[in-house]
Image (cartoon, rainbow, N blue to C red):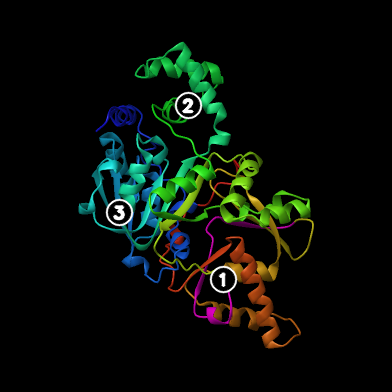
């Protein structure tokens, strides 16, 4: 273990993160297995899926994911023994018996740990002494057709965090003197409410690397991984960010890498992104996510996002406000008809697209032909699919909907 890794381990021994023992987080996009597996077009049932949470911390998100997908098999690894002990208690708190825990350094993992269909590495890679080595080690454990999700700090929006840390370093350079550095940081921030653990992780971390879209693409390429999409891909849309149609066309004419690079420079500030959440896979594998519903899609299983909330619009009859939220971002609001909302809510992953379409058409009072009504419903499905309101898999969902905590929109 190198010196930086030892200091990171010591920091988390003192300040295990997030450190909320007995409190399990709500499900997050990067932990929704249905959503993740849909990006690969995986034909595996949830009970066949093996998931690795690489750097699980105190396990709030892992415990939540394991309780929402009780048939999947989970492994959590963590550098800090103290964090791991809390993670085990959090798993017990929600009676998640489908998790195995190990104390391991990501940069030292080997094939002995097994292979995984999904590898989640949230908020860890940017703290490693050798991020590229860490990703490469994890890539060797990823099954062909598997998906890796990475949560990486954004260089453009962490300037304040960097400045505070630089100021603290001038006043107290010894990084081991956490109590004194915490006192200084609180005074500089004028924040006496933030928990010590959260403050240390956000402003006083002993090692931190920052990223841009370009840096991420290059990093993945060196690790023989392919970038698949951003978790909040619908946000990366020039048409919603820029009013000038000529400029929009210029951006759309760029290669994917350059298009993302341009949008990255404006999106991060526009939505106050703290980090990137990305999906990656093996460079040599052909991933087949469903991009559009067509005639051959009737046997697929649509699943609505668990991250939506629906309210009746107070000013208009038969109109509903649908809010969808990505982690650490304000809700995106869409206005939909009652029929559209009804169709989306039927997508619980237990019925095929064909069954839902037939049911929806039978319930409608539209004076039109059966085929025309089916076509209209199919258009709505594609609208919802393109905005991540629903995803689709070739097998039923394994989600225990009753175990999903309601998304907290009050702070957004």
Q: Which residues are magenta?
A: 292-313
Q: Is residue 137 left or right of residue 279?
A: left
Q: Are marks 1 and 3 in contact (CB under 8 Å)?
A: no
Front residue of this view, candidates 39 and 391: 39
* Residue 360 numbered mark, or none: none
Residue at label 2? 203
Does residue 293 show up magenta in the picture? yes
Residue at label 1? 346
Image coords of residue 239 (percent x, y): 71, 55
Question: Vertically, is 182 above or below 253?
Answer: above
Q: Is residue 161 left or right of residue 342?
A: left
Q: In percent of the image, x 40 and y 72: which residue is there?
A: 43
How packed mark 1 is, by other alpha carbons closer than 10 Å (few <14, some 14-19, many 20 or more), is some
Q: In percent of the image, x 56 and y 71: which residue is there?
A: 346
Q: Which quadrant, please, contains the N terminus?
A: top left
What is the quadrant of residue 286 in the picture?
A: bottom left
Could you tell me which secondary element the residue under label 1 belongs to? Answer: loop
Q: Which quadrant, please, contains the C terminus?
A: top right
Question: Vertically, is 21 above or below 166?
Answer: below
Front residue of this view, candidates 189 and 403: 189
Q: Is residue 285 visible?
A: yes
Residue at label 3? 140
């Amino acid at each position: 273990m190198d010196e930086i890794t030892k200091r990171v381990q010591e920091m988390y021994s003192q300040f295990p993160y997030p450190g909320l023992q007995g409190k399990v987080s709500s499900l997050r996009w990067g932990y929704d297995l249905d959503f993740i597996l849909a990006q690969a077009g995986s034909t595996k049932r949830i009970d066949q899926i093996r998931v690795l949470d690489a750097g699980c911390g105190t396990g709030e998100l892992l415990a939540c994911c394991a309780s929402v997908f009780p048939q999947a098999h989970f492994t959590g690894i963590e550098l800090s023994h103290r964090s791991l002990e809390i993670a085990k208690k959090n798993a017990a708190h929600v009676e998640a018996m489908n998790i195995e825990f190990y104390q391991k350094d990501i940069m030292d993992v080997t094939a002995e740990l097994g292979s995984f269909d999904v590898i989640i590495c949230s908020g860890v890679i940017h703290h490693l002494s050798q991020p590229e080595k860490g990703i490469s080690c994890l890539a060797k454990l990823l099954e062909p057709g598997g998906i890796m999700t990475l949560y990486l700090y954004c260089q453009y929006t962490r300037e304040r965090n960097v400045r505070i840390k630089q100021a603290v370093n001038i006043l107290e350079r010894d990084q081991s003197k956490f109590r004194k550095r915490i006192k200084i940081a609180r005074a500089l921030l004028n924040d006496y409410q933030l928990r010590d653990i959260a403050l240390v992780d956000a402003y006083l971390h002993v090692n931190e690397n920052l990223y841009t879209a370009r840096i991420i693409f290059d990093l993945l390429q060196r690790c023989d991984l392919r970038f698949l999409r951003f978790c909040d891909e619908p946000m990366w849309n020039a048409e919603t960010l820029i009013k000038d149609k000529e400029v929009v066309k210029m951006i759309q004419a760029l290669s994917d890498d350059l298009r993302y690079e341009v949008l990255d420079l404006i999106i991060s500030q526009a939505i106050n992104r703290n980090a990137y959440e990305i999906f990656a896979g093996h460079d040599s594998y052909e991933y087949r996510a469903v991009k559009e519903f067509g005639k051959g899609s009737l046997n697929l299983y649509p699943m609505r996002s668990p991250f939506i909330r629906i309210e009746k619009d107070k000013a208009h009859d038969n109109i509903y406000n649908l809010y969808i939220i990505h982690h650490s971002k304000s809700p995106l609001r869409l206005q939909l008809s009652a029929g559209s909302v009804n169709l989306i809510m039927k997508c619980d992953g237990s019925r095929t697209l064909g069954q839902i379409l037939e049911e929806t058409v039978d319930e409608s009072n539209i004076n039109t032909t059966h085929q025309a009504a089916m076509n209209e419903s199919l258009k709505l499905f594609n609208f919802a699919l393109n905005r991540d309101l629903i995803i689709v898999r070739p097998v039923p969902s394994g989600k225990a909907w009753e175990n999903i905590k309601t998304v907290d929109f009050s702070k957004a």
